[in-house]
Image (spheres, rainbow, N blue to C red):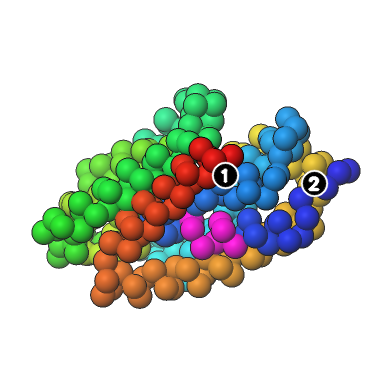
């Protein structure tokens, strides 16, 4: 068994994943750039293991949502067994929103990885997404409407799901496109953020399970068990903190700060790419 992933590197990757997963700044993009900065990869085995780890480390973010939204998750579970009508409706909306990205992701996963999983495409997506945020914050609907999450229809959930499919491009941000879509449909900021997080719970769980079954053995053979688990724990703790901060921030500030951040980090990445 080899281990090309040190404890410090696992902690850094876990911190990056936890902080960025639910913020509208793209966790996948940040992980790709961080891996490059840490000098990870370089062989076919380690590159595959790193790609798998970048997905499986999302378990930490999944656990954070389960803990922070345990009341809503419990209602979904009651809905699954027919004991909560509100839980059943929301569960149906989550399934409708999950399907588009799942179909596109499975059908085009190899093409997406070969064409878009690079520093250049990520930086471009950061900048475009940042400009989009700055434009959105100047629209009258950017602070949200009056619809609560309980009013979410299957049609609106499907529209949000189609928007989520755009986040298959690393750097776009799943949280960004789903929150923006919900706001544009007239939902409150609180409803948009909560549905985005719950949809992330479903999407990340499916992606992690798929990748774990597909390449989990190679991940363990390359990096072992203890070091990846360390990163997962760090991802969980940092995701809890990041989600709590984001929910509080958006109640009174809006998305603009994330737009400026995306533009800044995108430009710096392109400059660094050109220099080195």
> Residue at the location (44% across, 53% down)?
265
Give the secondary structure at mark 2.
loop
First-in-chain label (1 vs 2): 2
Q: Which mark is residue 18?
A: none
Percent across and percent down for residue 123 are 44, 42
Percent across and percent down for residue 185 are 18, 51
Identify the main secondary structure in magenta.
helix
Image quarter in which the C terminus is found: top right
Q: Is residue 19 magenta?
A: yes
Q: What residue sits right under mark 1 in the picture?
A: 32
Give the secondary structure at mark 1.
helix
Q: Which residues are magenta?
A: 15-21
> Residue at the location (49% across, 58% down)?
20
From what the image shows, is residue 150 above or below residue 174?
below
In this rendered view, identify the residue nearer to me: 111 or 100. Answer: 111
Q: What residue sits right under mark 2 in the picture?
A: 4
Residue at far left of view: 140
Image quarter in which the N terminus is found: top right
| In the image: residue 250, left or right of residue 6 | left
> Residue at the location (73% across, 61% down)?
8
Residue 11 in sight in this render: yes
Percent across and percent down for residue 258 are 35, 59
Determine crowd level at label 1: few under 14, some 14-19, many 20+ residues with C-alpha closer than 10 A.
many
């Amino acid at each position: 068994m080899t281990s090309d992933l040190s404890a410090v590197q696992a902690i850094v990757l876990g911190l990056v994943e936890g902080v960025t997963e639910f913020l509208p700044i793209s966790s996948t993009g940040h992980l790709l750039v961080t891996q490059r900065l840490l000098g990870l990869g370089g062989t076919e085995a380690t590159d595959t293991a790193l790609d798998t780890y970048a997905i499986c480390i999302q378990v930490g973010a999944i656990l954070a949502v389960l803990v922070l939204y345990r009341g809503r998750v419990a209602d979904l579970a009651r809905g699954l067994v027919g004991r909560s009508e509100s839980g059943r409706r929301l569960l149906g909306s989550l399934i409708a929103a999950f399907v588009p990205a799942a179909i596109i992701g499975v059908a085009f996963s190899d093409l997406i990885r070969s064409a878009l999983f690079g520093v250049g495409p990520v930086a471009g997506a950061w900048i475009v997404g940042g400009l989009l945020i700055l434009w959105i914050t100047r629209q009258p609907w950017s602070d949200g409407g009056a619809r609560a999450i309980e009013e979410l229809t299957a049609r609106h959930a499907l529209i949000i799901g189609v928007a989520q499919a755009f986040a298959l491009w690393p750097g776009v941000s799943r949280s960004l496109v789903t929150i923006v879509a919900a706001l544009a449909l007239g939902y409150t900021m609180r409803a948009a953020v909560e549905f985005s997080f719950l949809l992330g719970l479903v999407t990340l769980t499916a992606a992690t399970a798929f990748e774990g079954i597909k390449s989990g053995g190679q991940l363990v053979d390359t990096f072992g068990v203890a070091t990846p688990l360390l990163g997962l724990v760090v991802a969980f703790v940092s995701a809890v903190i990041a989600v709590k901060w984001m929910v509080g921030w958006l109640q009174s500030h809006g998305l603009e700060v994330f737009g400026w951040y995306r533009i800044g980090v995108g430009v710096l990445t392109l400059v660094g790419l050109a220099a080195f």
